[in-house]
Amino acid sequence: MERIICLFAGYLFGLLQSGYFYGKAHKIDIRNYGSGNSGTTNALRVMGAKAGAVVFLGDFLKSLLPCLMIRVLFRSQPEMVYLLILYTGFGVILGHNYPFYLNFKGGKGIAATAGLIVATDLRMMLLCLVAFVLIVAVTRYVSLGSLVVATIFFVWLFIFGRIGAYGLDQRLLPEFYIVTALISGQAFWRHRANIGRLVRGRENKISFKSGKK
């Protein structure tokens, strides 16, 4: 039951589409511009750096806060609290990627994943941040940096879960790995078009020039 509650609560938080509402406040439906999704990168490209920062912060916090709440509420169950954090974060990502009131057309879940990572392990967040910044700075491919973050997320939790770093009941490890794989898999699935363009050398590079205001 706890798993279902965390997943559903996360989905509700994920429905807060920062990019969509920021765009509406500026008389823009962001879904009609750029890549057509309501995430951070599209907000940055369409509306400029300020919009990108605001949208990222909103999507980051809507994941971080419920995940931290779960961490506190279930601190008396250390054998499964990290699994419940993953369920909550996964719910947020699903709500962000597939908001029912926008015909299930949302973002790609990377900012929400970042919030989950911070709530889970600050060391992992530091590694992800360094990797993301370096990759984007060198290649200017946000999609590539995002996919590397998703990969680090999976590998890190697989290794540290295996060695017992999160105090999980070992019987829950297979489930822990499955949810981790689903979260990472969502990033790759939502970036499938980007992956195709990366392979063909046609992926769009990020620009920090101001867009629509």
Image (cartoon, grey):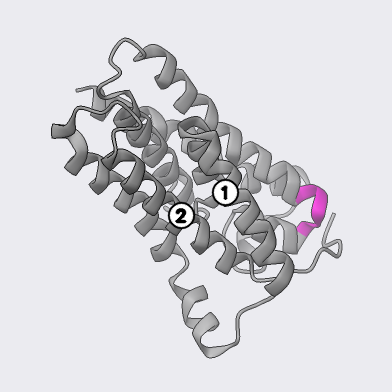
Q: Amino acid at mark 2?
A: Ile
Which of the pair 197/125 is nearer the observer? 125
Callout 2: SS? helix
Which of the pair 211/103 is nearer the observer? 211
- Chain part drawn in magenta: 47-51
Q: Quadrant of the C terminus?
A: bottom right
Which of the pair 106/208 is nearer the observer? 208
Residue at image location 57% in from the left, 67% down from the top: 143
Q: Amino acid at mark 1?
A: Leu
Q: Earlier in the sequence, mark 2 or mark 1?
A: 1
In the image, 15: left or right of 79? right
Residue 168 seen: yes
Residue at image location 81% in from the left, 48% down from the top: 50
Which quadrant holds residue 62?
Answer: top right
- Do the CB atoms of the residues marked 2 and 1 lie less than 8 Å apart? yes
Residue 105 seen: no
Which quadrant holds residue 77?
Answer: top left
Residue at image location 60% in from the left, 80% down from the top: 203
Which of the pair 92/106 is nearer the observer? 92
Where does the image place residue 131, in percent across and percent down from the top left?
A: 61, 57
Identify residue for label 1. 127
Q: Is residue 85 above or below residue 22?
A: above
Q: Quadrant of the N terminus?
A: top left
Q: Is 50 included in the stretch rendered in magenta? A: yes
Callout 1: SS? helix
In the image, 161: left or right of 202? left
In the image, 71: left or right of 35? left
Residues at marks 2 and 1, CA–CA distance in whole angstroms: 8 Å
Local packing at callout 1 (Cα closer than 10 Å; few below 14, some 14-19, many 20+) is some
Residue at image location 44% in from the left, 45% down from the top: 93
Identify residue for label 2. 152
